[in-house]
Image (spheres, grey):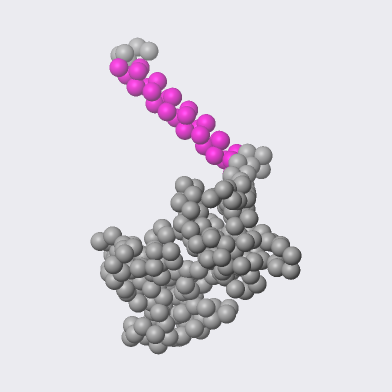
Amino acid sequence: MKGMNVSDTFWTLILAVFISVMIILGIFIWLQIHLPFFSTADPVSYSIEFVHVVNKPFMVTEVLAHVRFDDRSVLEQSIETAVTSPENASTTSLPRYLSDYLNAYDLREYQVSIKNGNNALMSFGSTKAKCGDNLDNPEGWCVSRFSFPSGVTSSCGTGRAQINPTQLTCDVTQRCCKEDRTASTGNTIVSCGPSGQGVCSEGERPFYSWAYEKIWGTTWKYTCEENRVDLGNPPECKAANGGNTRACCAPQTAENEVDAGLAVKSVVPLQYKQTTATLEVTAR
């Protein structure tokens, strides 16, 4: 075009290409939002992830059915333990063997139990984020000293107490917290949850939550301290301790996680003559 040099023509083409690309992207985004056959990827990916999470304990159970320690299968040792005892069945080292084996899998948490009725003959689980002097079943959980996004020092919470173990300890940025309803934190212990398994606690919330409540008049949702099962903000906690303990927090046990829908349990019957026991695997 007369009056335009090469530089002007180049940048005009670049601008035209950019506008064309933006128009094409806009069309595809519109199609993705409004046409159903363009939006099948998300439901499929969600369903695959859901199946993966649900199948974890069953996958672990299937693996354990084929594992052998001391020239005996895990199921055989589990049955012998249920019929006699860990000592008589020579299976006292089974938790250590299985823990070393299962730690190789990408499991956030796991719990394995051999039960005869309601009596747990043997129980062990992952020790990630756990602390305490009982190396087979640590009684405490590592909790960050600083919570996000509040940035203030994070406490163990109501119904928990800080301990200082000498064996399985946390790093310098964490404290070791043990469930203890008799511990004094300045708050009254108020039970909460469907079976009263939780305690109304201060929980964690961002530093700006108070302004949100004051300005908009909407109650901010409190979440439980680290490594506790969050049962929400039930009515019994709303008025407890002047409204400062709205979070209902339960100990992070396999049973509480299953009840809250955070984990899934797989149960394998162990039958020998008149004895019916179970091998239970909880994982997530």
x then y, percent, for residue 146: 29, 65
Q: Is residue 232 above or below residue 43?
A: below
From the image, give the main secondary structure of the stretch colored magenta.
helix
Residue 270 shows up from this direction: yes
Instruction: Identify which residue, 202 or 126, lies in the foreground.
Output: 126
Farthest residue in the left direction? 172
Q: Is residue 257 above or below residue 99?
A: below
Magenta stretch: includes residue 20: yes
Q: Is residue 227 above or below residue 64?
A: below
Quarter of the figure with residue 258? bottom right
Residue at position x 31%, y 13% from top? 6
Farthest residue in the top direction? 2
| Range of magenta residues | 7-34
Magenta stretch: includes residue 11: yes
Residue at position x 65%, y 72% from top? 117
x then y, percent, for residue 90: 53, 60
**Does 263 sit left or right of 275 as displayed?**
left
x then y, percent, for residue 236: 51, 84
Residue at position x 39%, y 60% from top? 129
Quarter of the figure with residue 12? top left
Q: Is residue 134 above or below residue 1?
A: below
x then y, percent, for residue 139: 41, 70
Q: Count the marks: how many?
A: 0
**Does 157 sit left or right of 104 as displayed?**
left
Residue at position x 53%, y 50% from top? 70
